[in-house]
Amino acid sequence: MTHANDGTRRIGELARETGLSIRALRYYDRLGLLTPSARTGGGHRCYDAADVRRLHRILALRSFGLPLTQIRAVLDAEPDHDPARLIRRQLDVVEERLRQTAQLRLRLLGVLDALDASAGTTTEAYLEVIEEMTAVERPLTPEEVARLSEARRRYAETLTDEERRALHRRRAETFAALSEDDRRRLTERRRQLFPQP
């Protein structure tokens, strides 16, 4: 992908690289969430590295369950945010999603085993699967994100170095338990959330 000599991206390039639609980027501009730093002589929106970082922040805050009007208030109130803190909060959300996805996978395998054994399955089993599916697809509320972040911080303070290494191994195992397609989708989602300027 080639960009302008100054490193900016036109709106179409940014849309292609992030998986967002041009319409969404224009909508963010109309709301004052993401105003491009420059325009071409023909009026095309051009985004620089700071714009890309701001877009990441917008998408992260949306994934935390904040409405766009509240996101604008947060961006205006905290223009100099700590990006590492935001990434840590995103990791909390991703890890919760991985946990929920792993639970859903196990639940689905149990239902499939029952069907394969011709034992049929109960209405309760389907209700449990639906509950797990809903949990995976539902955006976390800001309160849930804050609770996860605080719980992670408190938990991390209690760990020894050996326990931290064991935790990293368990996270890797959880990731490995996902199907190849799920891992590919997760990797692609991370690429979209953390674009390289």
Image (tube, rainbow, N blue to C red):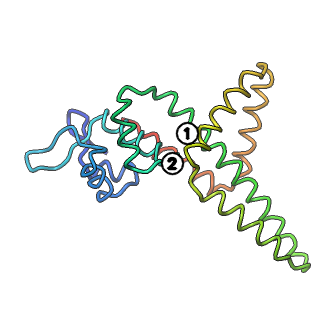
Q: What residue is shown at x 67% (from left), y 48% (from top)? A: 98
Q: Quadrant of residue 197?
A: top left
Q: Quadrant of residue 107?
A: bottom right
The CA distance from mark 1 to mark 2 is: 8 Å
> Which residue extends farthest left?
41
Q: Quadrant of residue 111?
A: bottom right
Query: 155 or 84: which is nearer to us?
Result: 155
Where is residue 181? Give x, y as percent: 62, 58
Q: What residue is shown at x 65% (from left), y 31% (from top)? A: 150
Left or right of residue 116: residue 131: left
Amino acid carrying label 2: it is: Ser
Question: Which label was assigned to residue 135?
Answer: none
Query: 124 or 118: which is nearer to us?
Result: 124
Left or right of residue 165: residue 21: left
Q: Which residue is mark 2?
A: 63
Question: Which label was assigned to residue 90?
Answer: 1
Q: Secondary structure at mark 2?
A: helix
How many numbered discs sit on the rendered protein?
2
Circle 2 Cα neighbour tier, 10 Å, few/some/many (<14 / 14–19 / ≥20)? some
Where is residue 19? Give x, y as percent: 40, 54
Where is residue 39? Give x, y as percent: 15, 43
Label pair 1/2, CB-CB below 8 angstroms: yes
Amino acid carrying label 1: it is: Gln
Q: What residue is shown at x 23% (from left), y 42% (from top)? A: 36
